[in-house]
Amino acid sequence: MIPTLIPMTTWPRWIADLHRLLGIRPQFILSGPIRDLFLTLLDGQTVLLPILDCLWEALAIHGYQYLLVYDRVDGLRLHPDTPATRQGASRTLHQDFQGAPVPVSLNRLPTVLRALITANVRAAAVIDSASRVPISVQQLTEAEHEFFTACEKLAYVAHPIIAAPDRTPRFNPLLWLCHRENDLPSWFTLDNEAVHRLTLPAPDFDARRHAAELLAPSFADHDQAVPEQHREFANSFAQLTEGLSLHSLFAIAQLAEAQRLPLADIGDAVRCFQVGELDNPWKKAYLRERIQNAAEIIGQRVKGQQPAIIKTVDILMRSVMGLTGAHTAATSSRPRGVLFFAGPTGVGKTELARALTALLFGDERAYIRFDMSEFAAEHADARLLGAPPGYVGYDAGGELTNAVRARPFSVVLFDEIEKAHPRILDKFLQILEDGRLTDGRGDTVYFSEAILIFTSNLGITIEDNTGQRRLRIQPGEPYEQVERQVRAAISDYFKFTLGRPEILNRIGDNIVVFDFIQPAIAEQIFAGMLEHITRRIADEHDLTLCISEPVRQQLLAWCTEDLSDGGRGIGNRLETTFVNPLARALFHLADDQQRQQITVTAVRLDDHIYRVELA
């Protein structure tokens, strides 16, 4: 038992309501998180207890001697189970309690309950897991219907008991513990004034803060911390665990105790619990070493996008240092990083995402990619999050939630985000703000350890008066002008076209604009592609491929004639002008096993067909 730092002088409201109504109502339905832990007053101190212990402590102060607990698995048992309670209950209820549960049928149970609620000693009955009493609440069996009918009658024949110590009339109540009120037959609860409904709320901030104070001793440096550190810890713990149960807070404290974490690392403890991973890659020394020269490493793969690379690396370093959302007063549970890559097609947006993944996790295939053009329909959100409850396949979860649950430390790429249905974009509000989503099964998935990357071509083209799309920005324009126009187009799209400025607001200044491929950069990209071709020829056919300089210059001219499609356009042109005719020529040389080197001496276009000459 751990004393609280700030004593809780009152019971939770639902317990206070129970105290107030014990003399008025004979039955209570307690619905909500019945398997949670509850703040309980015990000998002037506050402790966290399961619901049966909490109820017992609440009723014991009014002279109640025991709880008679029933569930469908074990039957009847006493709480607390002591020699005194066994003797008293056996005498009152005519049952032989010997420290083990007593099996009892639904047909006989109302007789036992009647004996308890009409006894001249204070006691209470609890139907534990009442949601599991009926097999189907819409189609009760005969035994179930007779049981609920008998319990309904008990509510009307019960009368308050005047007993020691205070001689105040109070019922011996029947308490139903169920997850949802509609788990019981509607006719049993409808217009029944003898049955009072108490909803157990999810723990609010104050409850979580009290629980945090109780759990603080689980952290390694609790004894050395000053009161100000205790207050800061309790507030942080309560903020970080919004939406979690007190049982989850207890589990987090157990995790912290096992890992010997200090109070200052409460954020790590919460995140480890949420994502189910004890090891945090973001804290590893090797990761800082990897990103030390990140700009140079990424620049070797993504050519001509230095401003975009620098901004990306800055956001990455901010994520590694744990400073995402540091400008806000509240402790943030947002994703580790959010990047919005915008710019022309084929300039390296997806390649930068791959390079970033390889840098962080050592494998560029480790990123989770979603082509948002596949989610253009309104109902496609069921693919991401899972079908709603009641629909076919709802228990399978969603593609996005399942993927992030399996790999919480990951890069998640949403390609061409503007092609998704606006309703699906609304789902990103919760991810960007709270760092979590709830799937169709009701399971919460946390994105607090992921880096989210959105890509978009917004602002590059515009629709003219004839309905045709044309370039809004021309290759060769200064980067400052490209960035300004792309940012303006993105702002207009979210604010006016979609009418969702809040999405843009949550993305913030993490928009990274890519420039058009410039001629000098295009030549570097072209050279890299030729090198890949020669390496593939060597690997597949044990041939050394040589390309004469006139051929290289001719191919460069063809492939870089139009740079509006970026590096992908260069690759497409190179495939048409060189790879296809080269494959054709090599196919006819396949029987020549003596050759170890071939030289491309010429390329030409004859009757709309590209050809190569080999020597």
Image: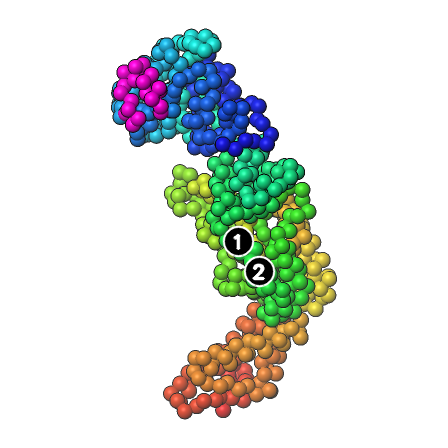
Tag 2: amino acid: Ala
Residue 85 forms part of the magenta stretch: yes
**537 vs 340: above or below:** below
Q: Secondary structure at mark 2?
A: helix
Residue 574 placement (x, y as % from top left):
54, 76
Residue type (three-letter) at the residue carrying disc 1: Asn
Colour style of the rendered protein structure: rainbow
Where does the magenta region start and end? 81-102
Look at the picture and state if 350 lies above or below 606. Answer: above
- Residue tagged 2: 285
- The structure residue drawn at horizontal position 37% and vertical position 29%, both measured from the top left corner, is 129
Q: Which comes sooner in the sequence, label 2 or label 1? A: 1
| Residue at screen point 46% across, 85% down | 543
Report, in whole angstroms, how far the alpha carbon at label 2 lies from the one at label 1: 11 Å
> Is residue 237 on the magenta stretch?
no
93 versus 596 height, above or below: above
Q: In the rendered structure, find residue 280 and report the number of the disc placed on it.
A: 1
Q: Quarter of the image holding residue 529?
A: bottom right
